[in-house]
Amino acid sequence: MKFNRSKTTFGRHETFPLRYGWLSKGFAALCATPRLFSQPDEAMMTLGVGRNMVHAIEYWLRAIGLIELDGSGAAQPTALGDILLGAQGDPYLEDEATLWLIHWLIASSTEQATGFYWFFNHFALPRFQEQDALNALNTFVERELRVHRAQTTLKSDLSTLLRMYAPLAGRHDEHLDSPLAQLRLIELTAGREYRSPRLIRPFLPPMALHFALAQRFAADPAQAALPIRALLYGGDDWPAPGPVFRLSEDGLMQALGQVMERYPACYALRESAGLHQVYWQGGRCDPLDLLRDHYRSIAA
């Protein structure tokens, strides 16, 4: 989860944004045939798509953390995958929190989706042209990663991201648009300019922020508190909910208030020496347990 500059990946999605039905269909098919993705011809017949789309479906399942490769090279569902897309979860993405959770998992996938992590954690322009973002991504790769990445790879990664989050005006085919376009985190204007501002976002489900915070505390159990500034701006190589969910300062504070109201035993907001921090006070922190409880509650 923490950004490691020696482990980065760009452009493994075959230029295909995540599409409606891909996650549930791919996950169910894999559960039935564990070596499905190592058998391209069978995967194409089972999923009803071409070879490149098979690779894209496998990529998105891995990038989100829903499947992983075992020692033999066969893909296996993860515990996270079972909770999100299993029979007791939300296989058809009907719960509004599920899309926000998937977005968080992609934007915090520092190794598998480095370009997406960069955009939502490091790129801060609220209005931009695609070339502006590409120039910034190139600068990030050169200065921060100090590696060479082909211009075509970076351009396709950014283009895929923008098509995945910004719905195309005048097109209403939901089977082509990504479900993440519903979040309206990026919008394309009539002048071909993109907007991705920080807002209050009152409809952000508390579970999404709750899970993001719990993951952060679980990743570093020795850290009992997180500064509000770090949650709002990041900058410490950890994915941060403020930029990932495109929250303004007021938006983050309102969202935190909703989380603490919904889950009062887990968090406390305190000020010490002028520093506002969120404290974890819920005992052992397992983000997967939080998700299990969430999906059980909405199924009841």
Image (spheres, rainbow, N blue to C red):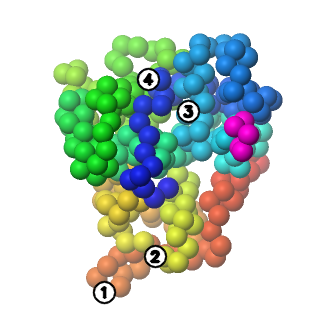
Question: Which label sits in the foreground, 4 or 2?
Answer: 4
Labelled disc at residue 225: 2
Give the residue drawn at x 28%, y 82%.
274
The dominant secondary structure in magenta is: loop
Q: At which x and y percent is residue 1?
A: 50, 55
Mark 1 residue crowding within 10 angstroms, few (<14) / some (14–19) / many (20+)? few
Give the residue drawn at x 41%, y 52%.
6
Labelled disc at residue 59: 3
In three-dimensional space, the C-alpha distance between marks 4 and 3, rounded to whole angstroms, equals 11 Å
In the image, residue 28 above or below residue 285: above
Magenta highlight range = 70-74
Q: Are marks 3 and 1 in contact (CB under 8 Å)?
A: no
Give the residue drawn at x 53%, y 78%.
222
Question: Which label sits in the foreground, 3 or 1?
Answer: 3
Mark 2 residue crowding within 10 angstroms, few (<14) / some (14–19) / many (20+)? some
Question: Which label sits in the foreground, 3 or 2?
Answer: 3
| For marks 3 and 1 on the same chain, the one whose residue lies earlier in the sequence | 3
289 vs 247, nearest the viewer: 289
Q: Is residue 216 left or right of residue 137?
A: right
115 vs 189, nearest the viewer: 115
Mark 3 residue crowding within 10 angstroms, few (<14) / some (14–19) / many (20+)? many
* Residue indicated by mark 1: 273
Give the residue drawn at x 54%, y 26%.
56
| For marks 3 and 2 on the same chain, the one whose residue lies earlier in the sequence | 3
* Residue indicated by mark 4: 15
The answer to whether residue 72 is magenta is yes
| For marks 4 and 1 on the same chain, the one whose residue lies earlier in the sequence | 4
Q: Are marks 1 and 2 in contact (CB under 8 Å)?
A: no
In three-dimensional space, the C-alpha distance between marks 1 and 2, rounded to whole angstroms, equals 14 Å
48 vs 264, nearest the viewer: 48
In three-dimensional space, the C-alpha distance between marks 3 and 1, rounded to whole angstroms, equals 45 Å
Q: Element under label 1?
A: loop
